[in-house]
Amino acid sequence: MSKRLVFVQSGLGAGGAEKIINLIAQHRARLGDEVFVLAFHDSPDSSFFQYPPSVVLRTMQSEISAPVAGGQGFLRQVRWLRKTIAEIQPERVVSFLTKINAISAIALLGTAPHLIVSERNNPLKQRPGRFWKGLISFTFNRADCIVMQTGSAQKLLNRAARAKSCVIANPCIMVPPVGSETSKQVIAVGRLTQQKGFDLLIDAFAAVLTKHPDAGLTIWGEGQDRAKLEKRINDKGLNSNIFLPGLSDGTQAWVDQNAIFVLSSLYEGFPNVLAEAMSAGLACVAFDCDWGPSDLIEHGVNGLLVPTGDRDSLSQAISSLLDSPEHRKTLGVNARKNAEKYALDTILQQWDLAIDGGSNG
């Protein structure tokens, strides 16, 4: 039987959470559900990801002219979300990201819709403070289903929260194999923020260039650390080897004809871009951070894992792949096979269980 569903997110940009919501919303709309996507920032016509006409997009920024920062902004977000959900009258509300989940839980106090919350990052690394820790606990108590991305993340939940939780990895849209074993191009993708460790990657790549001066590194993405990273590249005299072109033209355009993918994140919820790179048959190197890389990569079989934050190990791993096209090819072939378990249809079926029935184990 069709349902009326509301998805709640921060904005309509190019992030991983926005991408997953877009995929689930499209899927549920195809099944015949009435689907609404609500966001606090941006405007409906500026969404990075396209939605079918049947999906209704609404944003707080486009409907009320009021600031959304600070304590007053938080309360406005709660009030706007509560009012909008009351207008829509959905059976299910699906919320993504820690703070948005808390806002959703408060907005739904005393209301009927089932609440499914998805934790997309590592709360132990984010240090949210006493206020937000209390809200996170309240959120998990209010939620009818809690979706975590890895088994390691699920283990952090207390017994009561774990009982109504499930593990759903991110889907991987399989990309045609594009790896070139002779290319000396290296790529990374993500928000230009401290979490993604691009400063460490730049330092590691500077060492790679001492042995492979014709190698190139392209870091796709945008974020608040752009100026810092540009300065770091300039100070090291690497403007001819390291590039920050911004967002790619498409969600997977960055994989085209590149040989090595690097994930330098200090922590993750589940690294979408790593799964996509592996599906394209790229040889991958990743910091062995919590969580995600070790769920995807078996070291030496379908990729390489190095200690988190270790510039020297990262540099050595990249250099070893540039030195050995055959090893790179083997890792890429095995990586593609492993990525098949995260096929979109499989993951969407797991989301169906979470949305329709609560927890799927």
Image (tube, rainbow, N blue to C red):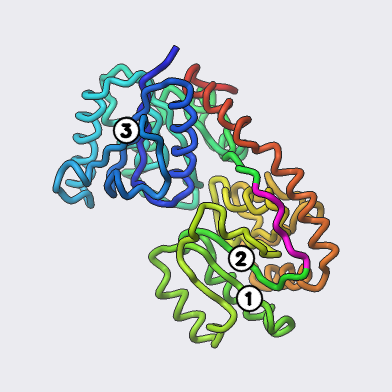
Q: Residues within 10 Å of mark 1 (few under 14, many from 20)?
A: some
- Of labels 3 and 2, the one closer to you: 3
Q: What is the secondary structure assignment of the residue under circle 3?
A: strand
Q: Residue furthest left?
A: 65
Amino acid on which disc 2 is placed: Ile
Judged left or right of residue 332, residue 159 is: left
- Measure the C-alpha gap from mark 3 to mark 1: 42 Å
Span of residues in magenta: 175-181
* Residue 76 locus on image (x, y percent): 18, 41
* Residue 250 locus on image (x, y percent): 50, 54
Say which residue label 2 marks. 187
Q: Residue furthest top?
A: 1
Q: What is the secondary structure assignment of the residue under circle 2?
A: strand
Q: Residue visible at 60% across and 23% down?
A: 361
Say which residue label 1 marks. 216
Q: Is residue 358 above or below residue 152?
A: above
